[in-house]
């Protein structure tokens, strides 16, 4: 069965161009979403995916109507492949029911992995550059050295934890974490 999917970003846009192309491609049934590509929930796409069975082919007018990014497209294509569902994009002339279409799919998958690797490499390089300048990421310490000294002095005078927390302006949990850190450093 040929299953068509169309998407327009707003109610003001008209899906007729996509619908005409999907009808010309011989789609037996067509689902249409009227939501922005930035929106995660696309109920008609989810309904199409639920309806699709092994041997069916999902057809779109253009790739950008189906996925929000290369990563999303690869995830959908992987799901289709696992479920033995074909995929065709009319404009880009991609057809995963053919050997050439499968090749294109694998190129997309490789590009998505390449994109993830580039992002990871840039993130690591940025963190290393920040560290070399003395900046360390993460949350700042909850206690200053002065507060730690005050806490230690009050603990040595056997003050209750709740009283220490109030006088230092922190929580009891922070005091207990400080004690645990001191215990692990001994």
Image: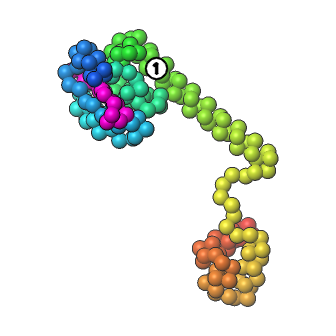
Quarter of image, res 128: top right
Q: Is residue 96 visible?
A: no
- Does residue 13 belong to the magenta stretch? yes
Task: Give the residue furthest to the right.
Answer: 133
Q: Which residue is depicted at the point 69% across and 64% down?
A: 141
Most foreground residue, 2 or 177: 2
On the image, the x and y values in percent for residue 67 come to 41, 30
Q: Which residue is depicted at the point 79% across and 50% down?
A: 134
Most foreground residue, 85 or 28: 28
- Quadrant position of the C terminus in the picture: bottom right
46 relative to 119 in the view: left or right: left
Label 1 CA crowd tier, 10 Å (few <14, some 14–19, many 20+): some
Task: Give the residue furthest to the front.
Answer: 12
Q: Which residue is depicted at the point 74% across and 45% down?
A: 130
| Residue stretch in magenta | 1-15
On the image, the x and y values in percent for residue 133 come to 80, 47
On the image, the x and y values in percent for residue 105 come to 43, 20
- Quadrant position of the N terminus in the picture: top left
User: Dot 1 corresponds to which residue?
Assistant: 106
Q: Which residue is depicted at the point 53% across and 28% down?
A: 113
185 relative to 38 in the view: left or right: right
Task: Give the residue furthest to the left.
Answer: 28
Vertical position of residue 91 compared to residue 119: above or below? above
Vertical position of residue 156 compared to residue 181: above or below? below
Most foreground residue, 56 or 68: 68
Number of numbered discs on residues: 1
On the image, the x and y values in percent for residue 149 come to 77, 76
- Does residue 156 belong to the magenta stretch? no
């Amino acid at each position: 069965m040929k299953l068509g999917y169309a998407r327009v970003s707003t109610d003001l846009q008209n899906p007729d161009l996509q619908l005409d192309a999907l009808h010309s491609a011989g789609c037996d049934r067509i689902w249409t979403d009227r939501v922005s590509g930035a929106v995660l929930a696309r109920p008609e796409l989810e309904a199409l995916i639920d309806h699709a069975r092994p041997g069916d082919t999902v057809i779109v007018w253009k790739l950008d109507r189906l996925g929000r990014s290369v990563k999303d497209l690869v995830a959908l294509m992987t799901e289709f492949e696992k479920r033995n569902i074909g995929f065709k994009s009319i404009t880009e002339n991609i057809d995963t029911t053919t050997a050439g279409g499968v090749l294109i799919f694998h190129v997309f998958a490789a590009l998505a992995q390449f994109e993830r690797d580039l992002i990871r490499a840039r993130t690591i390089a940025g963190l290393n550059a920040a560290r070399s300048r003395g900046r360390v990421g993460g949350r700042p310490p909850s206690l200053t050295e002065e507060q730690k000294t005050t806490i230690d002095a009050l603990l040595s005078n056997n003050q209750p934890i709740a009283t220490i927390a109030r006088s230092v302006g922190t929580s009891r949990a922070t005091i207990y974490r400080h004690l645990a850190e001191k215990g692990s450093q001994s």
